[in-house]
Amino acid sequence: MSLELKIFPAGYIQTNAFLVSNLDTKESVLIDAPHFVWDEIDPVLSENGCTLKALFLTHGHYDHIGDAARIQKMGVPVYGHKDDKIFYETPEVMRSYSYPPDMTLEPVMIDHWVDQGDVLPMLWEPVEIRHVPGHCPGNILFYFKNLKAAFVGDALFAGSIGRTDLPRGDFPTLEKSIKDEIYTLDHDTVVYPGHGPQTTVGQERATNPFVQA
């Protein structure tokens, strides 16, 4: 099985989108959809002859869902967590989140609500869902077991953690999520955050100044 991962920082605040493709079956999934990312991934899909089979949203903040409605209209099913339903369906509530004044956001009606412990058979690769609230109520991670890759949204960054000062954020909840759901992954699991460079579970357990293992 030949899996390919490409990273696309995009949108107003350079949010990472991740395109995982099975080059044997010609199927891809996209994790997060910042504004304008479709213009970058469409040529890659065409070049590889791949079809986008799913859009996984780590959470509902505006910088992660800017192109979600656009992609959904192409017939791509969207996956997310119900605790961020208000952000997906009524994105105007995020106007207070340093929302660029010229930015537009369309509502996203999630096709498949997922939750803790769900396993999705995607790309011949089991994808485990872990609920990691704290940055926001509906932040989830997508763990590709065979790749040993965890796409964590804004829960954890290289040497940092997600903000908890936004509405519905909570530091004790985030700390517990990181300890229980991220730090319990194998130490060599690669952590792909919503912003900035990748890291590993082992690196963050050992050195993260905000959440100690």
Image (cartoon, helix red, strand yellow):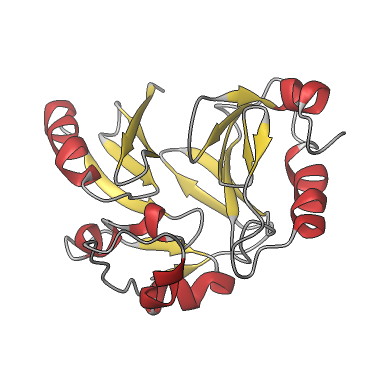
Image height check: is 193 above or below 120?
Answer: above
Query: Going by the image, does 178 lie left or right of 189?
Result: right
Observer able to see residue 90: yes
Image height check: is 102 above or below 83?
Answer: above
Observer able to see residue 187: no
- The image shows residue 104 at horizontal and vertical percentages of 23, 66
Residue at 42% from the left image edge and 59% from the top image edge: 98
Image height check: is 198 above or below 139?
Answer: above
Residue at 30% from the left image edge and 47% from the top image edge: 12
Q: Tell me which corner region of the image, top left, top right, bottom left or bottom right, holds residue 95.
A: bottom left
Query: Going by the image, does 63 lie left or right of 213?
Result: left
Number of numbered discs on residues: 0
Residue at 34% from the left image edge and 52% from the top image edge: 54
- The image shows residue 84 at horizontal and vertical percentages of 53, 70
Query: Going by the image, does 207 lie left or right of 193?
Result: right
Residue at 21% from the left image edge and 47% from the top image edge: 36
The one of 11 and 7 positioned closer to us in this rendering? 11
- The image shows residue 48 at horizontal and vertical percentages of 18, 27
The one of 205 and 71 positioned closer to us in this rendering? 205
- The image shows residue 66 at horizontal and vertical percentages of 30, 57
| Residue furthest to the right | 213
Picture quarter with the C terminus: top right
Q: Tell me which corner region of the image, top left, top right, bottom left or bottom right, holds residue 150.
A: top right
Picture quarter with the N terminus: top left
